[in-house]
Each structure stands twice: as C-alpha cells, then as structure tokens.
Amino acid sequence: MITVRAPATSANLGSGFDVFGVALDHPADVVSVEKADETTIEVTGAGSQFIPEDPKRNTVGAVVEALDAPAHIKIDKGIRPASGLGSSAASAAAVAVGLNELYDRGLTREELVPIAGEGEAVVSGEAHVDNVCPSILGGFTIAANGDITTVPASIPLVACLPEIAVSTRDARRVVPSEASMDDVVHTVGRAATLTAGMCRNDPDLVGKGMHDRVVTPVRAELITGYEMVREAAFEAGATGVTVSGAGPGILAACHSGDRREIASAMVDAFADAGVDSRAYQTRIGDGAEVLSR
Ligand SMILES: Nc1ncnc2c1ncn2[C@@H]1O[C@H](COP(=O)(O)OP(=O)(O)O)[C@@H](O)[C@H]1O
Ligand SMILES: N[C@@H](CCOP(=O)(O)O)C(=O)O
C-alpha cells in the first residue's frame, strides 16, 4: 500500500486563466492505493457526502484507466469539493503519483500531469491542468500548450473559503469567449509582472500581477460578498486579491506578518454579507509527497 499527500492548489491567480497555479502548503488530501483486480473507491473527510465513489464519476477513476492500474483507493479529503482550491485535482494528483509507484510505471512527475488532468475532464468538462500541475510538482507553475515551467516561490497567502458551492463546470460557462486587444495587453502585462514577482519571491509584484479584468469580474458575481471581502483584505494589507480557481474561494497574496489580520478581515467581511467562511493562513508549498510505502 502507498499513501500520498497532495496539496490544495489555487489556479489562475487572476491574470493566468487556465495557465497559472500554485500549490498551497495546506490543506491537502491524503490518499492510499493498494493493488486490486477491480477498482473501488472509499471517500471520507471534508464534503465526502458530495463526492461519488463510482470510478466513472470520481476524478481518480480516469487516472486508474490512463495508467491501467486497478486499485482499492481510500481518499481522505482535507479539501472541501467545489471550493476553488483544487479539491478534485488533489485526489487525481495523489492517485497518479501513488499508482505510478505501485505499478512501477516509471513516469516522471511532469508526465503524470496530463494523466491527472484527465480526471479534471470528468468533473469540469475540460482537461485543464492548472490545478494538477502544482499539486504534483509544487511551487508556482505555468502550464501552457503542453509545456510546464515551475518556479519554487514561497509567497505567503490567505485562502478564504465561504460556505457556498460553485462548481467549476458552471463557472466555466460564464467565461467570455472573446477579449478586446486592450484587455489582452492588460492581461499580458499583469501576467508578466506576476511571473517576475514569483521569480523574485516578491509579494508586492505578485499581488500587482493578480489583477484581471476579463474572467475575474464575471466569476466574482457568483460569490456573495466578493467585493466586500476583497476590499477588507486590501485594507488589512493584502498585496493582491482574486477569485481562487473558479471560486468560491478567494485568494489574497501578502507579506507573512499580515496573514492573521487579513484572514480575520476576510472572514468578518463574509459574515457581514451573511456568509460563513473559514480562512487558511498558508503559503506556496511543495507538491505531492509519498508518506509511506
Ligand atoms: N476525488 C474528488 N474530490 C473532490 N471532488 C470530486 C472528486 N471526484 C469527483 N468530484 C466532484 O467534482 C466536483 C468538484 O470539483 P470542482 O467543481 O472542480 O471543484 P474544486 O475546485 O473543489 O475542484 C464535485 O461535484 C465533486 O463531487
Ligand atoms: N482554470 C480553471 C481552474 C479551476 O479551479 P478549481 O479549483 O475551481 O477547480 C478554471 O478557472 O475554470
């Protein structure tokens, strides 16, 4: 039996829709895989009652098929589903890493990214890899046209998760199909700024680069209290604030000494909007880790 911990992730970071992602130091899913003739899945932990155990409907089922590696799979969810923190991706990432070892497939971590991405197609309709990439590799990742670049940044973050659910599938339907040249120029500028910030480990540059005017505004409308929470986070010292993945989670970049105040300001602002929430004071962290063999 092999047990793997795969971290939550935050995709897009505003200016990098379907391209940028970061691994969060916590929370995480912990998954155990054991060889079997037929695949079975058992799910416990956060939001497990909303997660199917049928391999055709769970993200890990597609990974089993792609690796031709049937197994008994136990998923202990640390990341609530439909969160914007890459919950579905973390399970797929953990199983890809675990089955690769269990069945001696000999694939590199980079080669496991598109395989874990197949799981995302099951739940969101498209095999976007911007969550599985950092969950497997760690750090800040850029996934563009099949190429992967990683930067081992360590930016402090606050991820605030309201008690509302937004499915990635639904939030992909509101993404505009076109952008003006003005918006393209703005996005390129911000994405480049963010990338430079990650390379320099500079929370101010990263925060500046998180601004986006194409996808984020339409997604923010799906999150009750978004504007109030965003403003509260900035007032408490955040250097950048955006929708985490497809939402409803909200991500703030900051300096480490400001995390506590930002976390409580975000939770209070959600409460003022009538929404319960919890905030994770975290930072960019490592990718999937094998805990035991
Ligand atoms: N192993 C899994 N972990 C979490 N969610 C899963 C898993 N397998 C299937 N799902 C389904 O995926 C959906 C959540 O995925 P998604 O909407 O992408 O949100 P998230 O941002 O949390 O990944 C839910 O409908 C959930 O039932
Ligand atoms: N690029 C995707 C990322 C979805 O992330 P999730 O954590 O909400 O699943 C998108 O924006 O649709």
Image: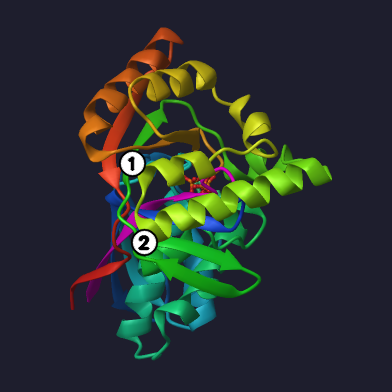
- Mark 1 and mark 2 in contact (Cβ < 8 Å)? no
**Mark 1 vs ligand 2: CB below 8 Å:** no
Q: Nearer the viewer, residue 25 or 255?
A: 255
- Magenta span: predominant SS is strand
Colouring style: rainbow
In the figure, is residue 59 to the left or right of 177?
Answer: left
Quadrant of the image containing the C terminus: bottom left
Tell me the tag on residue 259. none
Residue 162 visible in this rendered orientation of the protein: yes
User: Which residue is found at the position 42% from the left and 87% from the top?
Assistant: 107
Image height of 160 relative to 244, above or below: above
Which residue range is magenta in the image?
Answer: 1-15
Tell me the tag on residue 139. 2
Residue 250 visible in this rendered orientation of the protein: no
Query: How crowded is the residue under tag 1: few (<14 C-alpha within 10 Å), some, or many (20+)?
Result: many
In the figure, is residue 36 to the left or right of 224?
Answer: left
User: Which residue is found at the position 52% from the left and 22% from the top?
Assistant: 226
Tell me the tag on residue 157. 1
State the SS at label 1: strand
Q: Amino acid at mark 2?
A: Gly
To which quarter of the image does residue 290 belong?
A: bottom left
**Residue 4, image x, y percentages:** 27, 67
Quadrant of the image containing the N terminus: bottom left
Query: How many numbered marks does the figure carry?
Result: 2
**Residue 257, image x, y percentages:** 21, 34
User: Which residue is found at the position 54% from the left and 78% from the top?
Assistant: 66
The first of marks 2 and 1 along the sequence is 2
